[in-house]
Image (cartoon, helix red, strand yellow):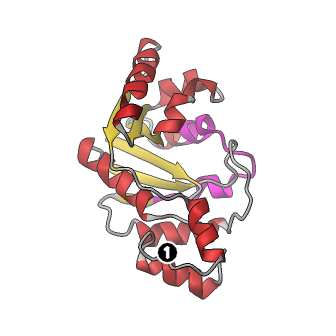
Amino acid sequence: MKIGIFGGTFNPVHKGHVNALERVLEAVDLDKAIILPDRIPPHKSAEALVSGEDRLNMCRMAFSAVPNAEFSDWELKNDEKNYSVITLRHFHKVYPEDRLYFIMGSDMLLSFEKWYRYEEILTLAGLICISRSNEDTAKLETAAEYLGRQGGEVIIVPAEPFEISSSQIREMLKKNIDCSCYLHKNVVQYIVDKNLY
């Protein structure tokens, strides 16, 4: 089986996240995708981070139409900062016979060799990188060749750029600006009902 692992802060999850995963599933024949909200991402501050339970619930709503999507609270239950290599070791134990793929954005691939134990990550999983522009793609191909020489498998998937970030959506929500065009309707309702952000 081929299993994609799609981690993120998802604070909140928006249509750009969903579009990105849908492009990946169109381009790569994955048997399932595991959506995995982060607890405390090592490279981000946890400012304005709503609870893991809320982010997982919003993910269930946002990705509800994505075929073969599963959801994991493994990182949320882990008390330490979660480095990707630790997460991949865990899933490698759970799925020892299967091929794992770690799904990431272009900025992550371009800084990948700075990641903690990145060489080990290449032994545990292939990398699927979502490219959002032609300019991106040339840089990504260079990075992919470099990692390929180290035994890594890198698949680059072009996707339409989505011109908004979770932090911009949080700012809009704080100011009561309508951002329903960027969010699944059930996520909008959930945020309103629970008075998040």
Q: Quadrant of the C terminus?
A: bottom right
Spot occupied by residue 35 in the image (x, y as percentages of width and height): 47, 55
Secondary structure under tag 1 reads: loop
Position of residue 89 relative to residue 7, above or below, is above
Q: How many marks?
A: 1
Q: Amino acid at mark 1?
A: Cys
Spot occupied by residue 50 in the image (x, y as percentages of width and height): 68, 68
Label 1 neighbourhood size at 10 Å, few (<14), some (14-19), many (20+)?
Answer: some
- Residue furthest toward the bottom? 193
Spot occupied by residue 78 in the image (x, y as percentages of width and height): 69, 52
| 137 and 34: which is toward the camera | 137
- Quarter-wise, where is residue 37 in the image? bottom right
Spot occupied by residue 117 in the image (x, y as percentages of width and height): 63, 25
Task: Give the magenta range.
Answer: 71-90
Residue occupying the point 47% across, 14% down: 150
Residue occupying the point 72% across, 65% down: 48
| 159 and 149: which is toward the camera | 159
Position of residue 11 relative to residue 131, above or below, is below
Residue occupying the point 52% across, 50% down: 7
- Does the segment drawn in magenta span residue 108? no
- Residue furthest toward the top? 149
The residue where tag 1 is placed is 179
- Quarter-wise, where is residue 11 in the image? bottom right
Q: Quadrant of the N terminus?
A: top left
Task: Determine whether, in the image, residue 158 is placed left or right of residue 87.
Answer: left
Position of residue 180 relative to residue 113, above or below, is below
Task: Determine whether, in the image, residue 109 is placed left or right of residue 138.
Answer: right
Residue occupying the point 60% across, 81% down: 176
